Image (cartoon, rainbow, N blue to C red):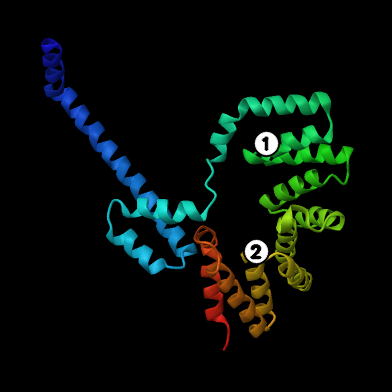
Amino acid sequence: MLAQFSDDFAGLTNPQSGAMWWVAAALGMQLTTWLYAAFWIWMVWHCLKTEPDRMLWLWVLFVVQGVGPVLYFVLRYLPSTEFRPPSFLRRWTRGAELARLETAAIRIGNPHQFIQWGDALRDVGRYEMAAAAYGNALKKEALNLQALWGAAQVAAIQKQHEQTRDWTRQILEKDPQYKFGDVSLAHGKALVELSETAAATDHFERHVKRWRQPEAVWLLAKLLAGQGHSQLARDHLQALLQDINGSPTAIARKHGRWKSRAKQLLRTLPQ
């Protein structure tokens, strides 16, 4: 054992191997520094974009060196988002499941199997294949709500707004309450992206009477403000802030982005 220790020490003190060790250590420290800087910038960006109490947390991020970004990540970022592993990692961990679902879809060929395969493909970021799977399900059952919703979600991700509008319209015509407002919200957002302002305003006015989703209320207020209805926009924004402030803490943090955006839009409205 003593001889082994002596050999290891001699290796470290050898000029050539010692120089290589110091180079490797320097590169490791530099990489760590760059990773920390990237993480810090990410947390600052998230704070500026979504945090209603941004001044306090910016102070933490800038002043509390080392642990500031970690504190913000644990206390603010994670509670405000549904954290999921990146798509490439999900693709790797679900490889066997994807193969099994593909086999079932090809062999059995019912809408149910194609929808399951499409959902898994969408989850791992294979959107073209997911769209094809949903399309196969719709060929067999044109008004299958699950297939229509899956196709609409893929279209929204790919910014194919006309397709999103058309898929969601078919769902709402068959079941206006499907997915408890998520489909209706997606339909309204597609109308906004297509600059169908009057239709979008009318849609969201009906939507917020049934579902008080912060994003929907904010979008309606923005539409009204753009049409010169400042007081109506202000009323909706103030109601949105009251809804969030009256929510449980975990939910209020999750909707912090819309609270911040509501306050920003309020400041731009004429008195």
**How far from the left and from the top, in percent, is residue 120?**
67, 36
Mark identifier at residue 49: none
Front: mark 2 or 1: 2
What distance separates the C-alpha of mark 2 from that of mark 1? 27 Å
Mark sitting earlier along the chain (2/1): 1
**How many residues crowd around disc 1 within 10 Å: few (fewer than 14), some, or many (20 or more)?**
many
Q: Secondary structure at mark 1?
A: helix
Mark identifier at residue 213: 2
Above or below, comparing residue 107 to residue 190 in the picture: above
Above or below, comparing residue 140 to residue 228 in the picture: above
From the viewer's perspective, tell me whether residue 7 is left or right of residue 250. left
Going by the numbered disc 2, the residue's amino acid type is: Gln
**How far from the left and from the top, in percent, is residue 68?**
32, 55
For the point 25% across and 32% down, the residue is 24
**How far from the left and from the top, in percent, is residue 118?**
73, 37
Q: Give the image quarter of residue 142.
A: top right
Q: In the rendered view of the protein, which quadrant contains the N terminus?
A: top left
Q: Nearer the viewer, residue 238 or 201?
A: 238
Above or below, comparing residue 40 to residue 129 in the picture: below
Q: Which residue is mark 1?
A: 120
Q: Secondary structure at mark 2?
A: loop
For the point 73% across and 70% down, the residue is 209
Going by the numbered disc 1, the residue's amino acid type is: Ala
**How many residues crowd around disc 2 within 10 Å: few (fewer than 14), some, or many (20 or more)?**
some
From the viewer's perspective, tell me whether residue 33 is left or right of residue 236. left
Q: In the rendered view of the protein, which quadrant contains the C terminus?
A: bottom right
Circles 2 and 1, Cβ within 8 Å, touching? The answer is: no
